[in-house]
Image (tube, helix red, strand yellow):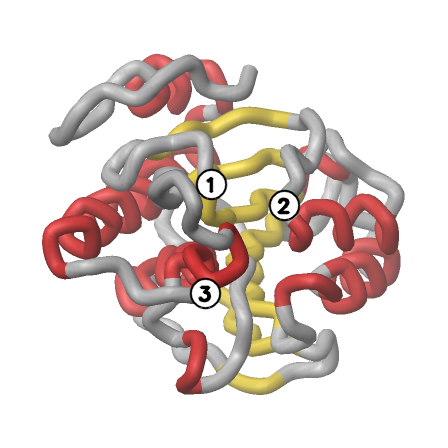
Amino acid sequence: MPGSFKLVVGLGNPGARYRATRHNAGFWVVDCLAALWQVKLKAGRWQGLEARAEPAGMGQVLLLEPQTYMNESGRSIAPLARMHKLAPEDVIVVHDDLDLVPGRIQVKRGGSSGGHNGLKSIEQEWGETDYYRVRVGIGRPPRGTDVVNYVLGRPPDAEWKRIEQAVIRATHAIEKLLREGLESVQQEFNKKAGWGPPDGPAEA
């Protein structure tokens, strides 16, 4: 990884209205990392909440929660990446994922946006797709439920507990990715559903 530091970005929407909604799973993971690494997220120059950390064995890491709203996440990430000459392999983006059941996570590098507006914005503004992604499962809505209302809704208690477990596992996956690389992380985390019902085929 050629950059002077690694960037871990959690995707979500700012403000109390969205804090507990499914679409903010990326923010929850970054909040968890900030607490684990004992750093405080504060408003910075990149239209987001930021914190620098040096967790043992992981080098320098910048945590970022864009405050641009989900659909314009790239406006926060792209200028930062260009200013610091970050390569795609220096960047880890954490986001909610409809194609994984609640409680499941997957780690991958590169790929399409899968219809996720935050990822679409990153590609549009930065022009890169080959960064690491940590996908936090939120499951698909029941038939007939509007997807926007679903991702911007708060999960019920039983589902919330599974997503909380996924958030914790995602923090461990990110630490392992920073220390050991992708293959080791995928072997440990991508094949385990943790607990709960198995999901269907996941996006490669």
Q: Is residue 143 left or right of residue 83?
A: left
Q: Earlier in the sequence, mark 1 or mark 3?
A: 1
Mark drawn on residue 116:
2
Residue 130 drawn at (x, y percent)? 73, 30
Q: CA distance from mark 1 to mark 3?
A: 13 Å
Q: How many angstroms separate mark 1 from mark 2 (CA)?
A: 8 Å
Which of the pair 52/92 is nearer the observer?
Answer: 92
From this view, report whether residue 128 is shown above or below residue 47. Answer: above
Q: Which residue was labeled with disc 3?
A: 152
Give the camera-side residue of 87 and 202.
202
- Element type at marker 1? strand
Residue in the picture at 64% in, 34% down? 114
What's the mark number on residue 145? none
Q: Whole-percent x and y of residue 5?
A: 64, 52
Neighbour class for label 1 at 10 Å: few (<14), some, many (≥20)?
many
Crowding at label 3, few (<14), some or many (≥20) Cα neighbours within 10 Å?
A: some
